[in-house]
Amino acid sequence: MERKLAWLVATWLFAAVGMIASSLVFGQPIGMFAAVPMMATAWVLGLRASVVAAVASLPFSFLCGALGGLAPLAVLAIDPFFIPGHVLAGAVTILLGYSSTLRQRLQAETKMRVESERARVEAEMQAQLGRADRLATVGTLAAGVAHEVNNPLTFVLGNLELTRDELADQGEAPPSAAAWAQLRASMDESLREALEGAEHIRDVVGELKLFVRDQDDTFEAVKLEEVLDTSLKLCRHELGHDIELVRHVELVPRVRGNPGKLAQIFINLLVNAAQAMAEGKGRIELRLVRDGDAVVASVSDDGAGMSEAVRAKIFEPFFTTKPIGIGTGLGLPVCASIVRHHGGSLSVDSVEGVGTTFRLRLPVWTGAQESSGMVSLGVGARLKILVVDDDAGVRQTLARLLDSHHECTTVTNAGAAMAHLERSAVDLVVCDLMMPRCTGMELHDRLQAERPELLERLWFMTGGATTERARAFVEAHQGRVLAKPLTRSSLLPALREAAARACLETSSELAS
């Protein structure tokens, strides 16, 4: 009996010391005082009391049970349920702890997923609001864009007709030297004006595409004065002839931004300023200045101005003071979102009956500046070029542009291009991206499967990517896609690359 009592006291003290030590380390004094008497009771009550002790003291009862279990196996003579009871108690404790950890982890993952989904939905909504605002603005600008195209188109067509008539009037007999000189001077002037008009139309269409297209979030070094000029061209007709436009533009550094999205801001501010004028008459003042490490652009008008109540709501989505059908209430909220994404700020000062000033502040670009040096137009080699386009006019024009310096072959589709590549060597392939039946993308896929060595010679041209697949393809091959209309200078990147490769291949052949 005394021996059993000694074993009991020794084991109980061993467990108590372990409990006290673990409680001091882990800071659980309540668990210590709850577990020690329960551990003593467990000798008498057996399995049930052990489980109660384990649950009450959470993980520390299992530790104490383990320490107590280190006593000699003779303890089994005192209570045969000692080891099984504590094993079960430890298992229960482990399961309780694992369940708690699993619950916490599940809650954390659920919270993270909810926050991620909320951010995704907010980003999609912002993108949709931006697209809706751009489309609404395009509707507003449509008449002005048509005016910007029709005016130069008038003297393009007029000068071309004049040149044709002058040539027809000469008849079959060769003109005298004096008549020829006069004819040539007149034709040169007509063709120069026609070319200028065509280039103006090209610029307007390019600026409109820049504004309308779905824009990514990439930033670059942007000349803000050029973005401002583009915006003025697109909305000049909307401003009207009775609005005085005053510009104070200083020489400022480039800013970090996205040109299309910045143009969207300026167009919104300019159109809003024009619509604030009574009877379309007034004054709009544009300023562009540097302020420390930022560039500040301001658009001021002497229109109706805003009350404090209106000014407090102008950046709220769908809030508008304009009549139904005139305003969407999206312009300024979208502008504010774009500015925040650019790391800038958009502020407004307005006095009712006096006018309004919006100030756009953008950080200066801190990356490398582009070189302004002139680039040579020569490529130094006569190349074999294959042009693939379903439009006969495009094929003929490119052939005439290239034939003076290179050997140019034209085909109408990707199948004909593959057949030509099977029987003839080429230095460069310029293929239209969007063609009926077989697109430039499909030609790329066929070459990748059958003639992968020719992929480095393949370039694309497009008047616009009209499908999701085409837009993704253009994004993936940005450096090898040329925008129509094409000129000699726009073809230069492809020509220079092909010339460098041809020179390298010739050197390798000579060396071997």
Image (tube, rainbow, N blue to C red):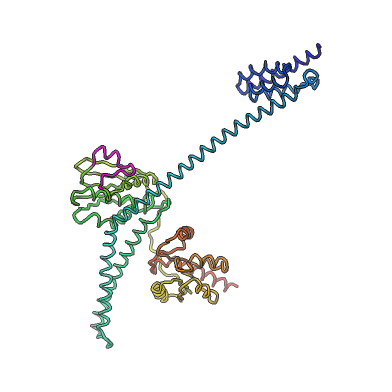
Position of 253 with respect to 307 (left or right) is: right
Res. 190 image quadrant: bottom left
Instruction: Count the marks.
Output: 0
Magenta region:
306-323
Asked if the stretch drawn in magenta spans residue 320, the answer is: yes
Please state if 444 lies on the left or on the right of 4 as rendered. left
Is residue 428 shown above or below 127? below
Rendering quarter of residue 402: bottom left
Residue 381 % position (x, y):
47, 73
Left or right relative to 245: residue 111 = right
Q: Residue at x 66, y 29 (%)?
A: 94
In the rendered structure, does residue 363 fall within the stretch colored magenta?
no
Q: Work out whether 148 lies above or below 317.
A: below
Tell me, yes or no, if residue 404 can be seen here: yes
State which quarter of the image contains the N terminus: top right
Q: Against 311, is 148 above or below?
A: below
Q: Quadrant of the C terminus?
A: bottom right
